[in-house]
Image (cartoon, rainbow, N blue to C red):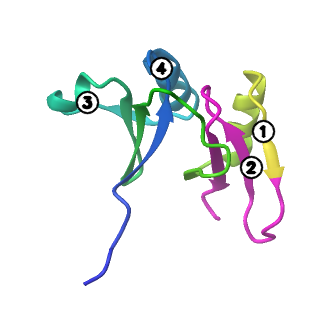
Amino acid sequence: MAVTGIDHVQVAAPPGCEPEARAFYGGLLGLEELAKPEPLAARGGCWFRAGGQELHVGVEEPFSPARKAHPGLVADDLDALAERLAAEGIAVEWDESIPEARRFHTADPFGNRLELRGIDR
């Protein structure tokens, strides 16, 4: 018996987060939005697909952003994504502490930390 993969990760956001979450995760990052199951839809938040995994934005009150814990996402054009985020005034912090990994950190509109790596890792 073993865990064989990751189905989804969840980040927290404050009530009313949905428009900003859609603009950031769907618009800027290009993730596909998924319909939440009806029993969960009333809780707020929204779900997205990233490749074979999902990223869920869940409402939490009181809300506190994750500044250290983070999902690690993979981008097919890391430089273009960094430029797109920077053009929107979103901080992009390149991290060279792992020489074989091209990556940067940024934050979603709610202050949650995100790591983005190039597809070639």
Q: CA distance from mark 4 to mark 1?
A: 22 Å
Q: How many residues crowd around disc 4 within 10 Å: few (fewer than 14), some, or many (20 or more)?
A: some
Residues in magenta?
Answer: 95-121
Dot 1 and dot 2 residues touching (CB under 8 Å)? yes
Decide if residue 40 is on the left or right side of residue 33: left
* Residue 49, numbered circle: none
Amino acid residing under circle 3: Ala
Name the N-terminal-most of marks 3 and 2: 3
Q: CA distance from mark 4 to mark 3?
A: 16 Å
Residue 35 position, x and y percent, is 26, 30
Residue of label 1: 92
Mark nearer the viewer, 4 or 3: 4
Q: How many residues crowd around disc 2 within 10 Å: few (fewer than 14), some, or many (20 or more)?
A: many
Q: Residue at x 48, y 29 (%)?
A: 26
Residue of label 3: 35
Q: How many residues crowd around disc 1 within 10 Å: few (fewer than 14), some, or many (20 or more)?
A: some
Mark nearer the viewer, 4 or 1: 4
Decide if residue 9 is on the left or right side of residue 77: left
Please check the rendered image and state whether residue 113 is part of the magenta-colored stretch, yes or no: yes
Q: CA distance from mark 3 to mark 1?
A: 30 Å
Q: How many residues crowd around disc 3 within 10 Å: few (fewer than 14), some, or many (20 or more)?
A: few
Residue 62 position, x and y percent, is 50, 27
